Image (cartoon, helix red, strand yellow):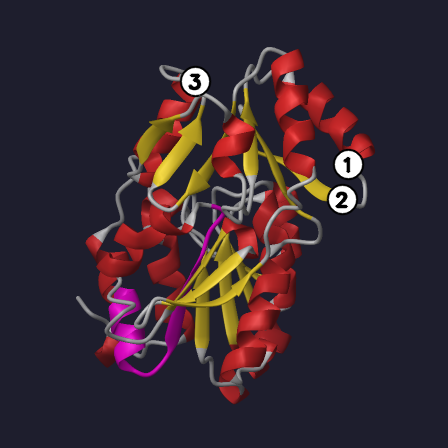
Amino acid sequence: MEWRDNSHLLTQIMNIPYKLIAVDLDGTLVRNNQSISQRTVSTLIRVQEMGVKVAVASGRPTFGTAHVADALRLKEFSGYVMSYNGGEIYEWETKKRMYAQTLDEEVIPYLYTYAREHGMPIMTYIGKEVVSEVEGNEYIQYSVMRNRMTLKKVDDFVKAVEGAGVVKCIIVGDPTQLPALEAEMQVMLKGKAGIFRSEPFFLEIVPIGIDKAKGLAILLDQIGIQRTELIAFGDGYNDTPMLQFAGMGVAMGNAAEEIKKAADMVTESNNDDGVAIALENLILRPQDKPY
């Protein structure tokens, strides 16, 4: 585990009690085989028993985070789920939606037409379902599997999502073709939507201004916690804003070097209990360790 700006961080750790842990899922909390280690689960439960809140902070749809939130017992400990990269925030005990930002409905017909013109499927998430006109696409099936959702095939995508409060749409396709589409759409939709690739084969279109730091700022304001009292864990480019925003930003060992440089601390990889190891150093005393 690598520390950055060591003296400053040691002063922080000694003087600032951490009250909230925001943790990304894929590549951070979740291992490459889609499991979470018992050591990591036990450590997060232990810090919650000590009074520290936990928020899942993921780009996944809300339903796609539910099994993780339940495994971490967020309902019992009054934790939070921040899904869609900050597009929705839920209080998990009551399932109360604390915040939501949805995509401008005028953008959706444009996205649909653009995707069709380039021979690529478009999909979105509504409730427990992945909605698309296409069945059998490997990338859509990947999303269905990873999020433990069901596929709803529709005849008219635009009509099917009308009035649903869509937080994001995803155009899926050949990873070699999506970078050019991403650049073109960033120009076409400037000021109207955010465009980025969350996977080489996923081009995400989200409401303008959404990111995890903004979502966490909204959550902290509502629950009365300061950013200096926040620990954030992440590995991806979409995690960089929250790593820079948090009082303690922790990058995973599997993160790209530029993401590590944006963090205050670098821990072990997602496959090597990186979240647990960092929390053991930042919060838990030897007698508090859950193993």
Q: Residues within 10 Å of mark 3 (few under 14, many from 20)?
A: some
Identify which residue, 191 or 22, lies in the foreground. Answer: 191
Residue 14: mark in rendering: none
Q: Quadrant of the C terminus?
A: bottom left
Q: Is residue 110 left or right of residue 59?
A: right
Q: Which residue is mark 3?
A: 134
Whole-number angstrom distance, CA of label 1 to CA of label 2: 5 Å
In this orientation, does residue 243 appear? no
- Badge 1 amino acid: Leu
Q: Which residue is mark 2?
A: 192
* Mark 1 vs 2: CB contact within 8 A: yes
Residue 242, how many percent across, how many down? 60, 60
Name the residue rendered at 61%, 44% in the picture. Answer: 237
Q: Which residue is mark 1?
A: 189
Q: Is residue 192 left or right of residue 214?
A: right
Name the residue rendered at 50%, 58% in the picture. Answer: 88
Q: Residues within 10 Å of mark 2 (few under 14, many from 20)?
A: some
- Badge 2 amino acid: Lys
